[in-house]
Amino acid sequence: MTHDVNVALLPRIARQTDSKVLVVVMDGLGGVIDPASPTALERAKKPNFDAWAKEGALGRYVPIAPGITPGSGPGHFSIFGYDPLGLEVGRGVLETLGLGIDVSPGDVTARANFATAAADGRLLDRRAGRIATEEATPLARALAAAVPAVDGVRIEIHPGLQHRFALVLRGAGLCDAVGDTDPQAEGVPSLAPAPLTPAAERTARVVAEFLRRAHAFLAGQTKANHVLLRGFSGRPAMPTLAERAHLRPVAIAAYPAYLGVARLLGMDVEPGVSPKSTVADEVTALEKAWKKPYDFYFLHVKGTDSAGEDGDEDRKARVIEELDRELPRIRALAPDVVLVTGDHSTPGPLKAHSWHPVPFLLHGRWVEPDEQTRFDERACAAGRYGSWFPALSLMPVVLACAGKLAKFGA
């Protein structure tokens, strides 16, 4: 039987030390073991990862529960020792915090897309042709000026990347229990913002009026003439990594959602990284952060997930190879413990997140090595930690191997 020791026990036995932990998350890393179709990890030429595998221990972890497909937020929270089933963290607050926007208790946020709709309201493109950031940003700012408030509620629009922006509602009596307006399909109209509880009825009316005004303002646009909203959420009350495990953490990540996770967990964010950064650029940022007084480093690589969602296993393998070429620089930093994994599996044949266990590699002085010599799904399934390792046990094992947990009991 596996217990979630992270909530009550870690704050009691965690101790601050000078040992340094590195967690590398290659987004959507995992694939499906299939004799007829090698995974990206199996295709990749990755001598440095394989050397770490030979020295360390492997396994596959289950982010939530067998058969349950995780989103990016739940997947990351699991890695860091937070039970996603006990958290209510919507994508809206992750995107908003990731953009560096403060979210206070009582605020409601949503992830927003510019979209393209026909005259009869049918969605033609949920992402407005992936409109360029340089074109979308001034449009978002103009929309913000056109609809600054609704019914005493302040409306904020914060541009993101391409078609994305964050919507923030600030005012009294708001509730985030509002249904998405994005139907996740084209050829149909967007949905009305439905209140999911009686307490959210006023918020839903405010959102509906915002959308009415927004669509009227955007009516002259050829591409971005519609707005879709999803992931309505407020800021949850949750302990930081400093409070839970006495860590001094920092994140190196390029995209808002992952920066949002980092900020919710109390991580600092190393500057100098953007969606245009290469993997080498991110490792350079890691080197800079390594000279600062942190002891827990989160390095996020996005390209593996994007390639998996496009069904391009060869491109996914190239991203893995790109990071593998940078591992000598990471080795030179001499981290005490390294965890390499993904936040979920994104098999190329599925072109989507999946429920399959996620491969991981653990390396460090006190990690008991196994007999595996390659880092891929088959080796991980046969590795020391097996194919069904519980996600919530990752953090205690990592911290123990780094000497950051004291003895429990007399």
Image: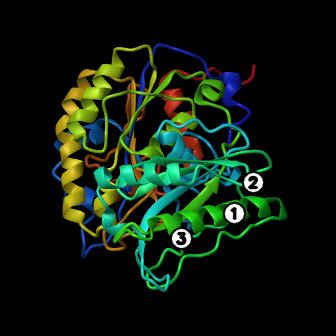
> Label 1: how many residues lie within 10 Å, few (<14), some (14-19) or many (20+)?
many
Q: Earlier in the sequence, mark 2 or mark 3?
A: 2
* In the image, residue 209 above or below residue 335: below
Between residue 333 and residue 271, name the one nearer to us: 271
Left or right: 365 with respect to 83? Answer: left
User: Looking at numbered disc 3 in the image, what kind of residue is underneath it?
Assistant: Asp
The structure residue drawn at horizontal position 46% and vertical position 57%, both measured from the top left corner, is 387
- Please tell me whether residue 353 is drawn above or below residue 261 in the rendered image: below
Name the one closer to the observer, 357 or 145.
Answer: 145
Which element is circle 2 on? loop
Residue 90 location in percent, x, y? 60, 53
Residue 182's disc is 3
Can residue 174 be seen here? The reply is yes
Local SS, label 3 = loop
The dot on residue 175 is 2
Q: Residue drawn at (19%, 48%), measured in percent from left and top?
A: 321
Between marks 1 and 3, how big is the CA–CA gap?
12 Å
- Residue for point 64% across, 74% down: 192
